[in-house]
Amino acid sequence: MNDASQTASVQGSPTSGGYFRWTICALLLFAAVINYVDRQVIGILKPTLTEVFHWSDERIYSSIVFAFQLAYAVGFVLAGRFMDAVGVRVGFATSVSLWSLAAMAHGFAGLVPEGWRLPMLNLDANTGFAWVTLTGGAVGLALARFALGLGESGAFPASIKTVAEWFPRRERALATGIFNAGTNVGALVTPLAVPWITVHLGWQWAFILTGAIGFTWVAAWLWLYRDPAHHPRLKPAELAYIRSDPPDLPVRIPWRTLLPHRQTWAFAIGKFMTDPIWWLYLFWIPDFLHRNHGLDLKRIGLPLVIIYLVADVGSIGGGWISGWLMKKGWTANRARKTAMFLCAACVVPVAFAANVKDLWLAVGLISLAAAAHQGWSANLFTLTSDMFPRKAVGSVVGIGGTAGAVGGMFIAMLVGAVLQATQSYIPVFIMAGCTYLVALLIIHLLVPRLEPAKLAET
């Protein structure tokens, strides 16, 4: 045993080797903040954009959301492999640069001529699949959303891969929960900043100014990030602690070898079933609050801030629970699934959110469900590093992200069709309340002991 390893093992505490890994975690958190600011602006502005562009069909907005989800699904397939191939330093910087440009491009959607048309496949409550034709500004928004989806698809594969490289297994759920809390911070900041910018400068500047923030992060990332083994600011003792788990074999893992494994499908199905519920909160809750409780752009900020502030607690708490149980001697399998069951149970009451008349009771039910989703997500993401070697984590997260984005595509169409037909969110929230328990059952049936995948080595 070398001196650095001996120091880490003797002192034994998680901070005994140093703290620089948490600086990397902070960078991931800020990336998630920017990611969700750029992603959520359109949800806050949905009532404004509906009025500006005279959308009479709910499926126009759902088609614009669908464009993002489609690109997100396609991008995730490529992004995970891209991060594994070029590394997260270059890969993450490329991803953030692309999505920042796309976010700013939303502000110029009004310049698209009315003669431009874009047919989009959507759902009709009576006939099933049907074509919806976007025109003018809606075309510009759909194209910008598509580019945004391509860029943002790299965020989570890069972040999860970074956590796998910079943290030992016992800290990964907590680190994931911390950076994932940035999604809630972003979703919290957006309803505070966007209404003010819109009222004082116009809706276009809400997109342009928030999109430009990403380039400051890119500069900080390129300055601070290096691989742990070659980082000049990382102390040997902390590097030894990061590498304290049994080492992965330095082999190439072809993407095609991941698909036959039930561990891959457990993660992918979990994402396919539960990611769409988060998209529901992100893109449709402002409309729900406007439709069911009469909130306008000036009054919608506080309820959304509460929802995502509570979700922040859930993100960190959900990751902390499983880590705490593992420190008590629980296996990773038992600890992760217990934490996920508690989160799934806490989502169930959201089924009643559309029935209640009191605004703050509805906000409370949605807040609890959003917090539970984030706790669930922190543990679901961590399953990848429990079941796969570091070299494969980015690709597995990419596969699962694709599945989640495909699910998001369906819910975008489904919510638009349901609202067009019923003018009610009741069926949508009932579905949201039941999904997580079913997803956990399927995950448990596929990986009852959370055993590592036996991958072919080439």
Image: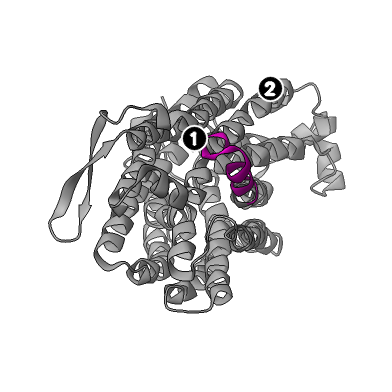
Within the image, what quadrant is residue 142 found in? top left
C-alpha separation, residue under disc 1 versus residue under disc 2: 17 Å
Mark 1: give few (<14), some (14-19) or many (20+) Cα within 10 Å. Answer: many
274 sits to left or right of 422: right
Q: Viewer-proximal residue, 447 or 301?
A: 301
User: Does any portion of residue 264 appear in the rendered image?
Assistant: no
114 sits to left or right of 29: left
Residue 152 - label: 1
Q: Residue at x 46, y 33 (%)?
A: 106
Name the main secondary structure of what is drawn in magenta.
Answer: helix
Q: Residue at x 67, y 39 (%)?
A: 30
Within the image, what quadrant is residue 71 found in? top left
Residue 219 - label: 2
Q: Where in the figure is residue 221, as x and y percent of width and height?
A: 68, 26
Q: Secondary structure at mark 1?
A: helix
Q: Residue at x 73, y 21 (%)?
A: 223
Within the image, what quadrant is residue 194 found in? top right
The span shown in magenta is 192-205
Q: Viewer-proximal residue, 146 or 410?
A: 146
Q: Please state which amino acid type lies under the numbered disc 1.
A: Glu
Residue 195 magenta-highlighted: yes
Q: Where in the figure is residue 116, as x and y percent of width and height?
A: 27, 28
Quarter of the image where the N terminus is located: top right
Residue 204 magenta-highlighted: yes
Q: Where in the figure is residue 314, as x and y percent of width and height?
A: 62, 61
Mark 2: give few (<14), some (14-19) or many (20+) Cα within 10 Å. Answer: few
Residue 242 - label: none
Q: Please state which amino acid type lies under the numbered disc 2.
A: Ala
Mark earlier in primary sequence (1, 2): 1
Q: How is the image coloured?
A: one colour
Q: Viewer-proximal residue, 170 or 458?
A: 170
